[in-house]
Image (cartoon, rainbow, N blue to C red):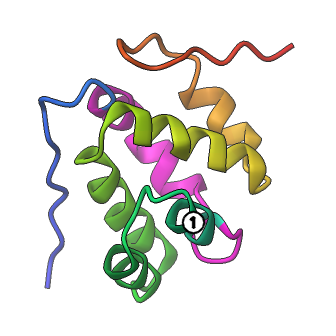
Amino acid sequence: MKFYLDFDDRSSHTSVIRKHYVFLLETLDVKFSGLLGQLYSEQVISSVERDDVSSESPSFRANEKLLSVLSHKSSSQFQLFLDALNSCGQQHVGNIIGDLPVPGLKQNHSS
C-alpha cells in the first residue's frame, strides 16, 4: 500500500514542511528520540496519532506520517514541534527548518 502525503495548503507552516520535505524524511528521528512522547505530552498529537506514527516501519514512513499529521495542525502546534525538536536532541533539524519566516510562528534566533 502506498502512502500519500496529504498537506493542508491553508496552513502557514505547510510551506516549511514542503520546502524541507526530503531533509525531514531522511533526518527526523521520531521513534527513538522521545519526540513522539514530547509531542503527545504537549498536546500536539493525540494518542491515536502517536500510535499510528510509531507503528510505521521503516523510519522514513514514520517520518512521512508525522509530517502529514503536522501539516494539519495549527501554527502554534507546529511551533511546539520545533520546540520539541530542540528538547529531544534534534536541534540541527529545528535550526534548519525554523529559520524560515512563516506568518504566525515565532522566529528562533540561535546564537
x, y percent for residue 5: 19, 57
Q: Residue furthest right?
A: 111
Name above or below for residue 44 compared with residue 82.
below
In x, y percent, where is residue 23?
A: 51, 44
Q: Is residue 61 left or right of residue 111?
A: left
Which quadrant holds residue 98?
A: top right
Residue nearer the viewer, 40 or 61? 40
Range shown magenta: 14-34
When the figure is inspected, residue 8 is found, relative to residue 98, above or below; the finding is below
Q: Which amino acid does label 1 sit on?
A: Ser
Crowding at mark 1 (Cα within 10 Å: few <14, some 14-19, many 20+): few
| Front-most of residues 1 and 75 | 75
The C terminus appears in which quarter of the rendering? top right
The image quadrant of residue 27 is bottom right
Magenta highlight on residue 29 = yes
Residue at left 74%, top 57%?
Answer: 88
The answer to whether residue 103 is left or right of residue 81 is left
Q: Does the magenta stretch include residue 90?
A: no
Please report the residue visible at 34 percent of the width from the left and 50 percent of the height from the top.
70
Measured as percent of width and height from the top left, residue 56 is found at: 39, 84
Task: Pick whichever, 108 or 97, lies toward us.
Answer: 108
Residue at 43% x, 55% y is 44
Secondary structure of residue under mark 1: helix
Q: Where is 45 relative to 81, above or below?
A: below
Query: What residue would you read off at disc 1?
Result: 41
